[in-house]
Image: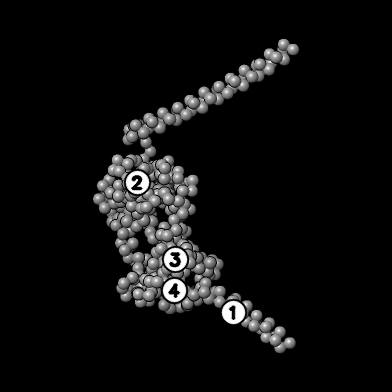
Amino acid sequence: MPATIYRRSTLLVMVLFLLTAYPLTAEQADAENCNLCHGLALFGITTPADGFRSFEVTSEAYRHSTHRNVICRDCHTDVNVFPHPEEVAKVECYKSCHITKPFALTGYSHLEQSEAHAISAHGSNPEYSAKKNAAKPDCKYCHSNKFRNVINNESLQENSKHCVRCHEGEGLAGVILHVSSHSGHRTAEASINVVELCSSCHADQGHMKQFDVNLTQVEGYERHFHGKALKRGLDEVANCMDCHRNHLNLPADDPNSSIHPNNIQQTCSANSYCHSDVSGKFAASAIHSEPTSQNNPILFYVEWGFIILTATTMALLFAHIFLDFGRWLGDIWLRRKEK
């Protein structure tokens, strides 16, 4: 009898331990229990100027985000009292954060990416109004964790342990794991999400007219081989960021741009899944343009020639079938009439 009680109590202790251990590992970064308030539904404030401002951060969204292991105040550095002040500083992505920079004692930051974005076509332009600059995408517009969630990979995690044998601490291994988890998994679904994200602005004619940008880019990509192959599930095909870069997105007339005429050949052959031995003539071919009789008459008339040829062939084919079917019905009618 005592042995039975002991086994039951041991089982009870193990169950309680498992139930309490799970949330600890899942929300270990919430060391100051911020989610106690911010996890409440419709948690926020209402102001006359801004209306309702939501401060809700669900635990599910937090656990599945790229920054799920980051302590809240690593980014919200000015939030150090409770209750919080009504106005808090905007989080800047170039701040040093939790991971130690490789081969250095400083904190890792997104400063390099932030500086590239600032001089890119998506960065703030001093010649634009504040409203026009606000219409440009910032860090959080693109990095919404929709396609940049950390991917768990056991072999990648195991390999990263070798780094700490020589390099002190786990900083370098953490950076390698953090970066590799994004770049090491390329799927058509992820590329489709990239194209959809870029298209959310570039396909909006009303939004893009204010920046005097060519409005045929999205349609041109979808008509081209890259867009058609992507829709059919081919993963090793160029998406928007492969050619235009993700942060240093410069206009085509900038000599440092990846799509400048002098750099396109290198851009097309940059990735192993792209065109490794591309020629200059091939790289100079149109990717996005909608061919017209003015800008590309040869391609325009060849395309329409194939359309007319295909339509004429199909029309003659159906006409032949219809006439043959009519002759067959006529033969049946004549045989019945003779009887």
Q: Secondary structure at mark 2?
A: loop
Q: What color scheme is it?
A: one colour
Looking at numbered disc 3 in the image, what kind of residue is underneath it? Leu
Q: Which quadrant is the C terminus positioned in? A: top right
**Which residue: 35% across, 76% down?**
168
Q: Secondary structure at mark 4?
A: loop
Mark nearest the camera among 1 and 4 is 1
* Any part of residue 47 in sight: no
Q: Earlier in the sequence, mark 2 or mark 4?
A: 4
Badge 4: residue crowd in 10 Å (few <14, some 14–19, many ≥20): some
Looking at numbered disc 2 in the image, what kind of residue is underneath it? Val
Q: Earlier in the sequence, mark 1 or mark 4?
A: 1
Q: Which quadrant is the N terminus positioned in? A: bottom right
Residue tagged by mark 3? 156
Residue placed most toward the observer, 337 or 64: 337
Residue tagged by mark 2? 213
- Alpha-carbon span between mark 1 and mark 4: 24 Å
Residue tagged by mark 4? 71
**Which residue: 70% across, 86% down?**
3
**Which residue: 46% across, 66% down?**
155
Residue tagged by mark 1? 17
- Alpha-carbon span between mark 3 and mark 1: 29 Å
